[in-house]
Image (spheres, grey):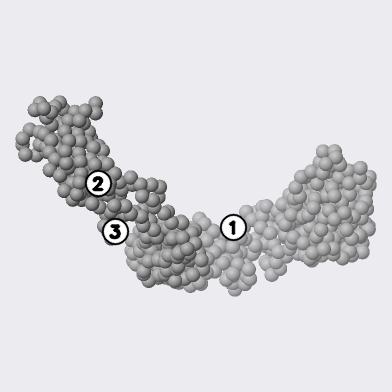
Amino acid sequence: MRIFLFLALFLVSGNVFSQLGFCTGSKGDPIFQETFGKGIGTGPALPPGVTNYTYVQGDPNDGQYTISSRIGQNNGTWHPGFPQSTISNGRALIVNANDNTAGMFYETSITGLCEATTYEFSAFLMNVYNAASVNVCEGTGIPINVRFEIWDETGTVLLKSGSSGDIPGSRTPKWEQYALVFRSQANQSDVILRMFNNGIGGCGNDLAIDDIIFRSCGDRTEINSSATTEKSIKVCAADTPVNVSLTANPDHSVYSSHAFQWQESQDEVSWQDIPGATNINFTSAPLQSTRYFRVKVAEDAANLNDNLCSSASEAFAVMVAEAPGAPVSLGDVQICEDDPILPLKVEAQADETVLWYTSASAGASIGNGTSFYPETEGTYYAEAIKTGFNCEAGPRTAITFSISGRPEVSDESRQLCTGGAIMLDAGAGNYSYNWNTGETGRSIEVDSPGSYVVTITNANGCSAEKKFEINPVEEAAMGKITSRGATITIEALNAGSFEYSLDGNNFQSSNSFTNMPGGIYIAYIRDLEGCNTVFQEFPHIVVPVFITPNNDGQNDRFELKGVEFFSKSEIQIFDRFGKVLASGSGAGFSWDGTYNGNELPVQDYWYHITIEDFEPLKGHFTLRR
């Protein structure tokens, strides 16, 4: 199967002629840079004479090329796009070499070189075959292999050559930059660049090239200062003006002699020569703001005026830190209790670090950054310092953090009378209300069972939900009424939540009434909303729970209290076998625990009390000695 070759010029690591390699010293500005265009899409054809390949739009076939930012448009075995890692990141030269014919595919003249000067040629190269393609080329495909040659302007003297070596296809697209260092001859200002395809034809061997660059190569020159071993000096504005003394140190890797020209810049982009600063040593004028210094180096002073014939050191910076201003507060922060903590925020300059404190002055820092999460309520203070400088901080900015309480609420369960309505009250206060019914008042009237929720919000914007569970009323039915001792217990016949009363006015949630004197009573039961009330009259006779006939004046006899309220009553006392031990009219009845003059044993005895118009009262009591 044939795989189209997408050729990009620029490789490393030679295996024919000399090795490729980068300039190890300082580099000048480019005298030639072919980007093939920075736009998107397909670019124009190369000028006549640059290549004998045929120009096409879209992916090229054998013996064709294109200029484009796109790749793999109609060839599914190529990578789907270029990675953005070259200098220009635009269009590239894409070449599909002939299947079985290795040879030159690119030639161009480079003009404007300085004579007897060392240069670096470089370019980016990429194998466009996608090795992740299934069942296409064997392995990673036929590798690409490009040879670079630098000739004199006549094309008869080879100045330098090198080969990239084999570059196999990869599973992800990647550019690699390669370089070749050569030296121009005396009286030579032009050279010819030629590129050859060393690879064989077949499945693979497709490549792309971008950013062909020629630039001067000089000694690697460092700038040193006796004041520091770093490449910069940091100064606080309060300590200016300041002078800096610098020394140029070329490594002698390229130049046999050296001429110097010191330059300065305010932005490290635009550089100006410093008049008279042409020695290996340099001392600046008094500085009050940030400045950058570098030194241009050439073998001959005449070449210092031409960036293309000289090299420049890396910059040495004198960084002056202006006193920072107060950080700009983005506002006090207030949260409601139980809410997540929100950060306090300020704005500061990009070259500043913000520190946080608990006091308006002095104290230890408790955090850093433009955002700070406080742990407790209070006022916090932010100050800015210049990052990397040991200079005075700016003024502090105060920001308050507060936590507000929520309205106190308790849920309610209510009952709704059949066919009736009830008022639901959310409670008084400086609040706003929002019910799930859409109403916004403190109270609402409802006439149907269900769940009602009101959101109560205070003046600080903190909210709480109060829930009302409204159920149909539970209608009471009278059950058993128990009178035991001085206690009366009223039982409802059905389950539910009810209130109880013995006078019809004072109701209680407990169904038990204690210390009640004997007499005729009415038991009342009603639902919690007072929809329905049931009642029943009953006698309350205070019957002793036990007797202790020891003549101490307390509980010596079985006597009834309250029976005098009834016109007719009878009482009988039995032992456990049902034998009647004593009987008589309830009023004035008294029994001392004897039978026929004999003391009866300690045990339980039973009573049966009959009152006219009422159900009989039955129970038992204990005889103790």
Task: Measuring from the top left, give residue 390's x and y in whole percent.
Answer: 43, 62
Depth-wise, is mark 1 or mark 3 nearer the camera? 3
| Numbered badge on residue 222 | 1
| Numbered badge on residue 504 | 3
Name the residue at 21% across, 28% down. 579
Q: Quadrant of the C terminus?
A: top left
Distance from the alpha carbon under mark 3 to that under mark 2 = 24 Å
Can residue 556 be seen here?
yes
Task: Count the marks.
Answer: 3
Q: Residues within 10 Å of mark 2 (few under 14, many from 20)?
A: few
Can residue 114 be seen here?
no
Quarter-of-image position of residue 467: bottom left
| Numbered badge on residue 612 | 2
Q: Is residue 444 above or below residue 575?
A: below
Q: Quadrant of the N terminus?
A: top right
343 sits left or right of 405 in the view: right
Q: Residues within 10 Å of mark 3 (few under 14, many from 20)?
A: some
Q: Secondary structure at mark 1?
A: strand
Q: Secondary structure at mark 3?
A: loop
172 sits left or right of 423 in the view: right
Of the two numbered discs 2 and 1 on the same chain, state the one appearing first in sequence.
Answer: 1
Q: Amino acid at mark 3?
A: Gly
